[in-house]
Image (cartoon, grey):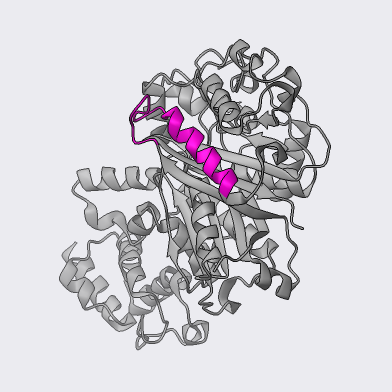
């Protein structure tokens, strides 16, 4: 899957959890889920589950801990897809 | 300090009416909310009828954000939010993102058990070794205080925010706990209420105890028969009721409308002795509770216009009426009117006390005494204590100044609250 395609899917997944709509307009590789989008940290586990369902992958706890930005998510999704 | 406490807002999600207006109309017209539940038939319940609020499909969107609705599987939270938010708005108080933390506002919103359907989801995932798939909302939808926590995400209360639990006494207890806190000057406004989930996982245990009627699956509206000679057990129910209790001074200052005053009340337990047990009340405890409530309200027994009993439609109904008669030292034509909402809604368990209190207060603010369905064959032991006219079958439209509301619960716990017209 291409990076742009993954970012497009991520944007859709993340949308319901976003609390800062202005920052969401600039959604891109550098976007930080908590710092920029002000997503409640408790909801990160829900985003991970949605990502697993969308991309048909499993994200382990270590990867989850390192998933703070869109860039991190893209990297993790790509590596898991390779493993699959 | 002994401040006066009034009711300035109400909301309800009852089996026979969701919203205060629909509920009031249902009371006056004698509309039953008890229906046949196909799910209970599929699961081979003995009792296949129940009273549960009918929530229009798009209604939750008015009370929850789209994010909160994702994975929401706790009917008690849905009922509690509808009633609680309606009550707060009805009282003219601020709600949602505009509301700032107010240190004088609190919430006491009880439940028996919360989010059983959500808990069932979690149990299946955990047993499948898939705990990580629970997501973030399993805890908040199944912790008992989830209901007060959800409510406070909209209300922004900064005073005590808690959930009480005392079986079928829960709702009435919440009101009395809130009134006490305001009377002592520790809070100015408290949203008091309670909720109860719907469904087989709530009602199954009662079905197993064989205390639910099983002969009315083809005639649901005749199934709940409080005070009747043919009362055959209580019809299970669910829902939520909510009342905003407020310091009188604050209510007058705000120019809030006042439905009624909480004159007083009492909470106790029979100690599970002398006839009291896990499932039955010690009559001595019940009578003390009634007498103390009247004393604390500062009224005479003959000032009570109407009793809204606990009266669940079991063999205990005559005992309860006898306890009222002995505690009030009134009988026959001197006895007040007496009715039971359970004839119209079934027994809403932990939500019963709050829904029935909303009904009691409406009787005062709108001057009527709702009719008691299915009591045409009044129990002979009750007819020895009170006259046929004391148990109205159809709604009476007349001035109502004082209503005594009682709730009793498993574990031999009692609560009686006295509501009066505000003067």
Residue B55 visible to an observer of this rendering: no
Q: Residue at x 68, y 64 (%)?
A: B91
Query: The N terminus of chain B appears in which quarter of the rendering?
Result: bottom right
The percent position of residue B299, horizontal first and vertical second, equals: 66, 46
The quarter holding residue B136 reads bottom left
The quarter holding residue B14 reads top right
Indicate yes or no whether the magenta region holds residue B316: no
Residue B400 visible to an observer of this rendering: yes
Between residue A27 and residue B320, name the one nearer to us. Answer: B320
Between residue B136 and residue B26, name the one nearer to us. Answer: B26
Q: Residue at x 33, y 70 (%)?
A: A42
Is B287 positioned to the left or the right of B115 in the image? right
Between residue B330 and residue B357, name the one nearer to us. Answer: B330
Residue A82 higher or lower than B349, as above or below: below
Q: Residue at x 55, y 58 (%)?
A: B179
The percent position of residue A80, horizontal first and vertical second, equals: 20, 68
Is B18 positioned to the left or the right of A18 in the image? right
Is A71 positioned to the left or the right of B64 in the image? left
The percent position of residue B399, horizontal first and vertical second, equals: 82, 42
Total numbered labels: 0
The magenta segment is: B270-295
The outermost residue toward the right is: B398
Q: Residue at x 19, y 61 (%)?
A: A84
The percent position of residue B324, horizontal first and vertical second, equals: 58, 30
Residue A5 higher or lower than B321, as above or below: below
Query: The C terminus of chain B appears in which quarter of the rendering?
Result: bottom right
């Amino acid at each position: 899957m291409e990076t742009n395609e993954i970012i497009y899917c991520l944007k859709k997944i993340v949308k319901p959890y976003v609390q800062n709509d202005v920052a969401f307009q600039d959604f891109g590789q550098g976007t930080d889920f908590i710092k920029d989008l002000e997503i409640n940290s408790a909801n990160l586990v829900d985003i991970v589950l949605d990502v697993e369902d969308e991309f048909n992958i499993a994200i382990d706890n270590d990867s989850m801990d390192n998933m703070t930005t869109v860039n991190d998510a893209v990297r993790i999704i790509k590596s898991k897809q390779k493993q699959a | 300090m002994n401040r006066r406490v009034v009711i300035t807002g109400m909301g309800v999600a009852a089996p026979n009416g969701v919203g205060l207006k629909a509920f009031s109309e249902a009371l006056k017209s004698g509309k039953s909310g008890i229906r046949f539940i196909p799910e209970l038939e599929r699961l081979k319940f003995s009792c296949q009828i129940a009273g549960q609020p009918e929530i229009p499909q798009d209604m939750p969107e008015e009370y929850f954000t789209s994010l909160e609705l994702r994975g929401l599987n706790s009917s008690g939270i849905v009922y509690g939010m509808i009633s609680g938010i309606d009550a707060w708005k009805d009282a003219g108080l601020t709600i949602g993102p505009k509301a700032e933390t107010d240190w004088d506002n609190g919430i006491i919103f009880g439940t028996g058990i919360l989010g059983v359907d959500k808990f069932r989801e979690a149990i299946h995932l955990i047993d499948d070794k898939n705990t990580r798939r629970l997501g973030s909302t399993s805890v908040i939808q199944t912790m008992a205080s989830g209901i007060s926590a959800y409510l406070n995400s909209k209300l922004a209360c900064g005073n005590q925010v808690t959930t009480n639990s005392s079986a079928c006494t829960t709702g009435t207890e919440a009101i009395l706990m809130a009134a006490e806190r305001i009377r002592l000057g520790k809070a100015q406004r408290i949203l008091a209420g309670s909720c109860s989930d719907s469904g087989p996982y709530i009602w199954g245990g009662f079905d197993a105890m064989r205390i639910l009627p099983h002969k009315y699956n083809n005639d649901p509206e005749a199934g709940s028969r409080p005070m009747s000679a043919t009362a055959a057990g209580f019809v299970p129910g669910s829902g939520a009721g909510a009342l905003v209790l407020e310091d009188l001074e604050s209510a007058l200052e705000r120019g809030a409308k006042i439905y009624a005053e909480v004159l007083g009340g009492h909470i106790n337990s029979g100690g599970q002795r002398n006839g009291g047990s896990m499932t039955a009340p010690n009559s001595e405890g019940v009578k003390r509770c009634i007498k103390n409530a009247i004393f604390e309200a500062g009224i005479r027994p003959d000032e009570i216009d109407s009793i809204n009993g606990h009266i669940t439609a079991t063999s205990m109904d005559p005992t309860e009426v006898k306890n009222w008669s002995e505690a009030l030292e009134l009988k026959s034509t001197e006895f007040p009117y007496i009715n039971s909402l359970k004839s119209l809604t079934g027994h809403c368990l932990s939500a019963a006390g709050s829904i029935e209190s909303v009904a009691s207060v409406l009787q005062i603010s709108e001057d009527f005494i709702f009719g008691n369905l299915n009591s045409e064959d009044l129990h002979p032991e009750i007819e020895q204590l009170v006259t046929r006219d004391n148990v109205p079958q159809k709604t009476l439209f007349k001035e109502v100044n004082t209503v005594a509301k009682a709730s009793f619960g498993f574990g031999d716990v009692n609560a009686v609250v006295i509501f009066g017209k505000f003067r």
